[in-house]
Image (cartoon, rainbow, N blue to C red):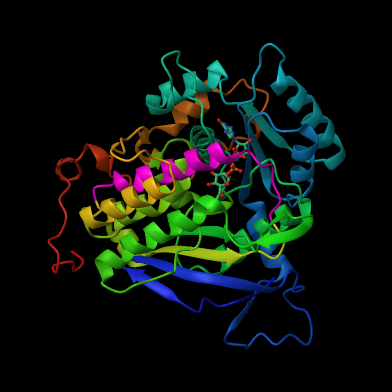
Amino acid sequence: MKIEIPREVERFGPIVFHGVQKVYELDSGLRNAKNDKDDNPIMKRIAYDTQHEIQKQMAIVVPIRNEKIKLVEGVLSGIPHHCLIIIVSNSPRFPMDRYKLEKDAIEHMEHFMDRDILIVHQKDPKLGEACAAAGYSHILDKNGVVKDGKAEGMILSKILAYICGKKYIGFIDSDNYFPGAVMEYVHEYGAGFTMSNSDYTMVRISWHSKPKVVESNLFFAKRGRASEHTNRILNRLISSFTGYGTETIKTGNAGEHAMTMDLAMKLDYSSGYSIEPYHYINVLEKFGGIIANPSEDVMNQQVEFFQIESRNPHLHEVKGDQHVKDMSKAAMECIYNSPICPEALKENIMEDLITRKILPKGEKLGNNLNYYPALENFDLRKFKDVLKNQEYAGLFKDKLPEFKETKVSKPLRDTKMAKERVLPEKGKLEMK
Ligand code: GDD
């Protein structure tokens, strides 16, 4: 892959937000290919062999709820061979067992692909038991199984990727019509990790376009309907602390994203579709120096966000206006309810929600989200032990990777500071 270096960089304490980067070649050949001009200072070449090395250490998670099996098969075919595929399904099991159909179809594909696929059902009681054994009951419902929600499935997959010894984890929605786009996203994840200097890195895909049929013609829309608003509000949040306007954030809702396991273990998560915008919020809350002191290692290494613009159009299942509104509301809720959200921005959020008829005038924006603490504070060996007799346990590693710091830090939402919503006074917004 050949990719331009970021043109813009926004710095926020130890957090680096790289502006969107364009891809110029999807495949730029082998590392030692002849006639390469590797000295071009504005282009990065990520050789095919480099991608391969990263893919061997990467799990690609495909969350599923009730998708067409043909679509899922296409997605799986686009995932490079050396990545470990983890499927977390929350498809209904009654009256028809959709999960069984998915599992049969995927296992059939697995034989032809000749690779291992870890497939679980989100509501498997054994997984609930494993979470409880690790002390991570936060994502469980009153019946002791993992709650519904995309975020909840993703958190589960993070634990699974960790106990499989993976260094990187990436997410691809299961309702993507273009297997070629899926493959491209995984290469872009690899490009971001190669360009990064930090163990704490996230790569987010900014789709080139989303095709739609408008008046019998194909129209390639640039951004999704929810993203536009989330991006604007996130950029305003950053500006309100730095004092400079910015448009750097273009991937507020990016469902297609990847991160290092070191970062995945350190983040708190929020529920449902708010998980992606909350990545930005939580990194700012935890490491931005506004209300919490970043750990020494994060200060030294920085947290790097890469945003890469894909070349393939993103065509996925359309789930209706109400779905988009719900997703947008969840994004706004996680920003609005953050202890770092200034009053003026809260007003902007309310105006935006009322204008778009997502919230009736006069109604307050509550907080219907759940927040889940960082996984680094839990004993995931106990999670692994509970699952030792499962059919997929052969994929688990005997020795689990160590974390850089083992210090138990309380989830931000439980701290006194977060509750009191301590914000720097206006005009005194320097980093602590
Ligand atoms: N395991 C699991 N559990 N998967 C789920 C669940 C769940 O409860 N709910 C949804 N999924 C799966 C879907 O099957 C799909 O593969 C993926 O999660 C995304 O869900 P969609 O409902 O299709 O979301 P979307 O396409 O409208 O939105 C996507 O793009 C947004 C950015 O525009 C999502 O990825 C959003 O999170 C993202 O913000």
Q: Residue at x 33, y 66 (%)?
A: 300
* Image position of 150 (left or right of 40): left
- Tell me residue 366's x, y (percent): 30, 35
- Region of the chain picked out in magenta, as a range: 314-339
- Tell me residue 268's x, y (percent): 37, 43
**Principal secondary structure, stretch drawn in magenta:** helix
Q: In the picture shown, does residue 288 fall above or below 172? A: below
Can I make out residue 202 in this image?
yes
Q: Residue at x 29, y 60 (%)?
A: 288
Q: Residue at x 58, y 84 (%)?
A: 42
Quarter residue 206 falls in? bottom right
- Tell me residue 303's x, y (percent): 40, 62
The residue nearer to you, when weighing 407 against 201, is 201
Can I make out residue 293 in this image?
no
* Image position of 428 (left or right of 83): left
Locate the N terminus and report the quarter of the image it occupies.
Answer: bottom right
Quarter residue 69 falls in? top right
Q: Residue at x 61, y 20 (%)?
A: 389
- Tell me residue 93's x, y (percent): 66, 16
Q: Is residue 324 magenta?
A: yes
Q: In the picture shown, does residue 89 fall above or below 6? A: above
Q: Is residue 32 magenta?
A: no
